Image (spheres, coloured by chain):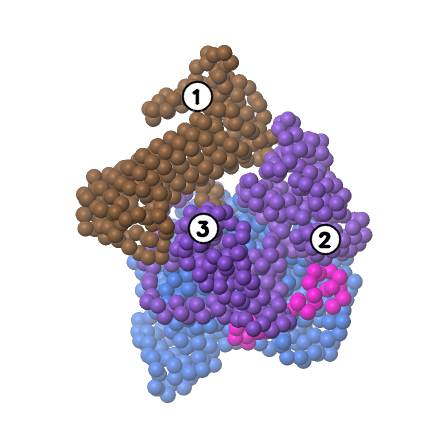
Amino acid sequence: MAVTITGGRVYDPANGVDGVVKDISIGDDGRVTADANGGASRTIDATGMLVFPGGVDVHTHVAGGALNFARGLVPENQRVARKFVHTPELRAGIGGLTPTTFATGYLYAGMGWTTVNEAAVPILSAKHTHEEMHDIPIVDKSTLLLMANNELMLDLLEVGEFERAKSLVAWLLCASKTFGIKAVNPGGVAAWKWGKNANQLHQPIEGYSKVTAAQIVMDLARIVDELGLPHPMHLHQNNLGVPGNVSSTIETMNMLQGRRAHLAHLQFHAYGGQDWSTMRSGAKEVADAFMKHTNLTCDVGAILFGDAVTITADGPWQHFLHELTGRKWGNLDVENETGCGIVPYVYSDHKLVNAIQWAVGLELLLLIDDPWRVYLTTDHPNGGGFWRYPEIMRLLMDVEFRRSEVKKLPPEALNRISLPEIDREYSITEMVIVTSAGPARALGLKQKGHLGAGADGDVTIYSAKPDADGVMFTHPRYVLKGGKVVVEEGEIRALTEGRVFLVHPDYDPAIEDFLRPTFQKLYTLSFENYPTEMTRLKHPETVPCAPSGSSAPSASAEPR
Amino acid sequence: MISLTLQRSVDTVPLEAESICPDVIAGLDNNAVRALPVYLGKRQCRLDDFFAVAGETSDEIELRGDLRKVRWIGRGMSRGRISIDGNAGMHLGAYMKGGTIEVSGAASDWVGAEMSGGVIRVAGNAGGQIGAAYRGSPRGMTDGTIVIGGSAGLEVGMRMKRGLIIIGGLVRDFAGLEMKGGTIVLRSGAELRTGAWMQRGTIISLRPIPLLPSFLYSSSYVPTFMGVLARHLASLQISLPVDQQVGVYQRFLGDTSVVGKGEILVWGAHTGA
Amino acid sequence: MGGKVTCTLGEVKNRADFIIYWGGNPAECHPRHFTKYTIMQKGKFVPQGRKGRTMITIDIRETPSARAADIALIIKSGKDFELGTTMRALMKGQPVDEERVAEIGLSLDTITDLVERMKRAKFGVIFFGMGLSMTRGKHMNSAGILNIAAEMNAFTKFVCMPMRGHGNVTGADVVLRWTTGYPFGVNLSRGYPRFNPGEFSTVDLLVRGDNDATLVLGADPGATMPQPAIDHLTRTPTIVLDPKVTHTSKLARVHFTTAVTGVSAGGTAYRMDEIPITLRPGLKSPYRTDEEIVNLIIAAVAKKPGWRPAAVMPRAGIA
């Protein structure tokens, strides 16, 4: 028996435990055990404290080519960011909006988050992502593979070769050692290779005569379902950030009828109005539509006032933001696959547009009345740093505080948003759902987000009382990872190594005969050098797929 | 007055001494001043490992010695006075908000970097990046005055937004690079690429200087504000020619490569005058 | 402030119909660049290959690369910054001083024509080399190219890419960024990473003699650096890890011969466009790898009495 946590008020909504004082025991295997046979090597007295399953960040950007590009673009941010001083146990590092790898692990663990989903990986540089993951301590990780602008796949969809496209996607997931599928601005990033975008869902993509953004969305969702991936297609929709994109968002939801999908950073896709001067919150309409589409989950991507760095595969949007703001701009197009754009940004509570954005994120969390389907994120670092999640938690749980913050907004904002009329306050249980239990379920990580028998011993223990500033949840008293105390009273105590989750869906082995010559023709390295070797992953763990009626024969090869 | 006299030469590994700052030292007694941390490379030392320390509880600091490798003196200061009888190292008065710094000898790079107020005077030569932005920062100094008696290096006033920089000797390339505002006076002219990519601001050169193709001649005159500036500089014991009988300023507008609205004013005495 | 607008090499292969090589000589320094990635390739959207692409060189002399160009522009030495600035003005329809343009060594008409051609391209790319980044102006010459590429995106698709040097310099850059937040010139003396080119960059540090020991891995400053730097390396303890005995080795206190990375030692190299490639060593070496030697040094240092850096430099009010 590794550890017993006694006397704490346990919140385990996945198992119906709603603030009950009970003990949690974690065995030597690092998993929660119902057996309390005594003999724990450590007992934590959590009397007067709250015991939660460790936080799960379903959408963040912490590792890989795009994030590393961003690091180089903003030395001025690093200069003023939190510093991590080298000690015999801890590596040196820099926090801030683009933290260095070691600091990323320390920061997430330090705030009680124990599982992190890196939302954007290109296949061509997947090795780089995995190298950085290797250097992020403590937290468990999953990754999403960028697919919606993969031109090999688009070329197949153009000529109606759906089955082959599906096999290709499966092969690429296996080759890149990733966990799920990410779709960003479907067709738009491919169009950006020629300096264009894809704003119309039903127009053919630049360079294609048949494939539309809508088709990509529906085909990829279908592929993900047929492959039976644990996590649904994770979609950054077309028309991000554009006033009036409510209609595009609702139409996209309608298109996904009957399919699982996860809508990323929904805040950026919930704007009404026609242009910047008439922009208003569209959160009500989006929330209403979302409630009807019970097949969908989402994360909000809320913004917080202050510095941010926008990092996204949505290249055309980033060029636009650069031209709009004059801030510096990074862009990297990845051959045949995807791209990324980076623009540092500041959200200001004096700016009408930013005030509306701030309200929209909170409105979505408050108006969507099903915490199991809406999750707390800031699309870090696009909306703000992940260590600021407790600020959002406070705004959700304390309507008086929320009202006092609304008062600081420019007066013109008030009749563009619905936030002032919303009374709802999140309960602790609901908070645990949107920061842990819900995202774990959406990711399909069955041992995460709960504290029932068999769950990973990832536990975050908070004081039940607010700190001197009246804030809760900023500094956990204890954080356990796999049953080991990794953080205690604000200090890192142990440096465990996290696991990397991946999938290995079946594919028709004939896909390699198609892919090899196509690859050699279109890419610039040897086909043998394309896949990421399994040896690059520290503690990989394959999560099974549950394919639905696939017609292709399966290649039951072991992951290489 | 607190007197710090260098006892031990600092000639290889530089000494980082951001503790030598009126805001840090003002309320401290002599023992506390002696114990202030300074960093020799990776080693943390005491101020009195390097300096003899006399005096206490003052915001006036006097330094003596060849401090050319003592860096960050006066970092972020908002009040008081630092006077150095000798040379000073990099980052002198960086992030300064107020007060004054005076150096009898030479200074190094990054004097007054990103300062927002106060006055720095260096009698001798200085290095580059005077009043400039640190790498990646959108802006350099936002106010204050820097006077360098001797020459200066590259990127003087890079991305400065407001404030006044006066350099007595020759300045190297890129003076006023990406300037956003403020005034730079080059008493002995500059080498190449002055005002490169400037958006706004005024660069005054008292000697002819080579200009980029993206600066266009506008007119020749003595602008009215020159009289105001000259009076202000006179209070700093610096003269500026303004007599139309003696000469005029040729005004060049640019940098057109960034559609900038900056100006470079180059003094030319009338021939035969 | 512009930015960095770039792509991976396959984008150039598949799309680029307008390629500028500025201050670089790939024919001799990156010998497979033309054939593998750029002008000679038949791309997905440039199926005619060489015939579908226009290649321009900009250099101070005629090189073998210039001889392969459709248009070889020869400019006066030290005028890259002026040319870049002029191009940025013309691109925006802004006036320039014709006499001062002529000092570049090209006529205003030639440069105007160049900019017009760039605007007409479907996909333009500027590769820039050390002829630019190592001559007067240095990083500002590179910044000029970066700004041209970024600003050209108002008209058409345009990117740029630095022609990196040998020895996996890109890999060092990439790894330093993710572990320290900065690409080079990283100072860890105060226990956390700090960055200030000119203060902590190698040549400047060595010329001023700011350090009291040097470990050199896979570089030869004793051959390339200014004399004061070489004198400093000679005066202070210098340790070299290299497969060969280099100029630096000869003035060092200790030299370790190590296995050649990529031939006998494995690892990951990052291509100039930051794509990681697994190295597959084919031969065995009697020498240990750099990694093994470095780890042994780390272990030996760990046995020494430790030091703990105490305080981070406090934030000073920065706007």
Q: Which chain is blue?
A: A
Which numbered tag is attached to residue B225? 1
Q: CA distance from mark 1 to mark 2?
A: 57 Å
**Which mark lies nearer to you, 1 or 2?**
2
Image quarter in which the N terminus of chain A is found: bottom left
Asked if residue A197 is positioned above or below residue A181 in the image, the reply reads above
Question: Magenta residues, as a range?
Answer: A516-541
Q: Amino acid at mark 1?
A: Phe
Where disc 1 sits, the SS reads helix
Residue B266 part of the magenta segment: no
Q: Residue furthest bottom?
A: A37
Image position, residue A521 (x, y; %)? 75, 61
Query: How many angstroms separate mark 1 from mark 3 (CA)?
Result: 51 Å
The disc label shown at residue C34, or none: 2
Question: In this picture, is B57 found above or below A85?
Answer: above
Instruction: Read off the residue under disc 3.
Output: C231
For chain C, the rendered hue is: purple
Residue at disc 3, secondary structure: helix
The structure residue drawn at horizontal position 78% and vertical position 55%, both measured from the top left corner, is C42
> Which is more toward the observer, B1 or A241?
B1
Q: Nearer the viewer, mark 1 or mark 3?
A: 3
Instruction: Specify which label sits upstream in the sequence, 2 or 3.
Output: 2
